[in-house]
Amino acid sequence: MLPNMGLTFSGSTRMDLSNNHFKGRVPSLPFGLAALNLSGNRFSGTLSFLCEIGQFLTFLDLSNNSLTGRLPDCWMKFQEKLVVLSLSDNNLSWEIPSSLGFLLNLEALSLRTNNFFVDLGENKLSGVILEWIGEKLSKLYALVLGSNKFYGRLPLQVCWLYNLQVLDLSNNGLSGNIPRCFNNFTSMARKVFKDDLGTHSYSTFGGRIPGRNPAPRACRSIINCRRLQFQETNEAQYSDNAWVVWKGTKRLFGRSVLQLLKSIDLSRNNLSGKVPHEITSLYELVSLNLSMNKLHGEVPKDMGQLRYLESLDLSRNEFSGHIPWSLAQLTFLSYLDLSYNNLSGKIPTGSQLQRFSYTSYSGNPQLCGHPLTPRCGFAPVAGEKDVEQDEDDHWKSYYTGMGTGFGIGFWGICGVLILSRHCRFFVFLLR
């Protein structure tokens, strides 16, 4: 156990006692701390000691301990300083206090395991998702609230997070419809790459890093120069990482992948209603998981607009109607699960949809065709096609028309490059 250190180290601005075997309650600490790292220990008790620290904190990491209880409600005093807050892998519970929304300079918040990153996954947090997340953290690019006890409807303020690239609200008790305003996530609809995304600089001297660092004093070696520069700028960096369910498997991604990942995971909730058409305008979306809800209606017919989609999971809902023809045009799709719905009709043929295992389609009694059955046992009656089949025929005739119009002009090229991806595409159209 640590003794009280408030007076002994009263002149300290940074303290790093991480990755030891300290236990018991966190003792009194210096009032003027700017950076505090107690991660990787066995500290227990509540976080009430934070309210006794001065307002100069820019970095706080208490992750991987045994801290319990609720989050304190004194975050307002850190509103102009705190950049990084990590409380992951503890036993914290109860609601998120509203004063957390006053951390105006917060860039990284992790309660699990601003350009912003919020990871609140796998705790015992409960209540409704607070509106201030959308109102205050407008620069958020990753929001992870999975595996908690949140309930109620999604606040429309979530749609104010225009920079959002990763949204994980899985495994909660959320209900109601998926908001139609999800098309406000413009970073999921266009190519965005920021080299500094996922890295956060903070000061160990009680303030944010200035835009320009002062020139270092004269030094005798490269190592010494770096030490002097660090002492003058008092700069340190923190990099983001997040657990994301990727193609059915939970994986930890670092900042280099998070920069590129565009993902929505609303699985394992009580969401109902139809999938809003607006979600198909998120053209750069890579992963979409809506499984284990109570969603019904048809699978959006223009799902094929999500041309970069690699993982799609709509399993264990109440979807009905045909599988839209446009899904066959998702050339990057490598994980698909449509199982245990009320889908019917024939699985679109002549496409990559036949390459998936039968388990991707099982649990749909009225669905037929390869890989479920060799063929469907009935022929459609002329004049009785429903609206969805007409829409599917529209997609089919559109792509077939392209092949007929351009196939002759490209045939000579395909005779030479018959193994190329584009030529296989045209050969497929002309079947």
Image: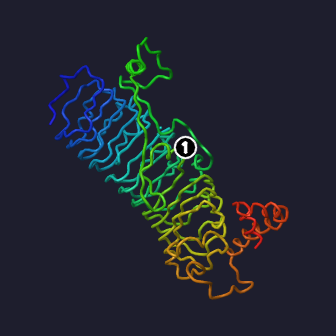
Q: How many marks?
A: 1
Q: Is residue 78 left or right of residue 371?
A: left
Viewer-side residue, 280 vs 158: 280
The residue most toward the front is 416
Q: Residue at x 69, y 75 (%)?
A: 387
Q: Which residue is mark 1?
A: 163
The percent position of residue 151, horizontal first and vertical second, equals 39, 58
The quadrant holding residue 72 is: top left
Spot occupied by residue 196 in the image (x, y as percentages of width and height): 51, 35
**Which quarter shows the C terminus?**
bottom right
Residue 333 lies, in percent from the top left, at: 58, 62
In the figure, is residue 323 to the left or right of 95? right
Q: Determine the residue positioned at 42% across, 26% down.
A: 208
Quarter of the picture holding the N terminus: top left
Q: What residue sits 35% from the left and 57% below the top?
A: 149
> Considering the numbered disc 1 on the image, is that residue within a helix, a strand or a loop?
loop
State whether residue 227 is above or below residue 29: above
Tell which residue pokes out farthest to the top in this image: 218
Residue at image point 47% right, 15% down: 215
Q: Is residue 316 left or right of residue 39?
A: right
Mark 1 Cα within 10 Å, few/some/many (few <14, many 20+)? many
Q: Position of residue 80 (x, y in %)?
A: 41, 28
Colour treatment of the image: rainbow
Amino acid type, label 1:
Asn
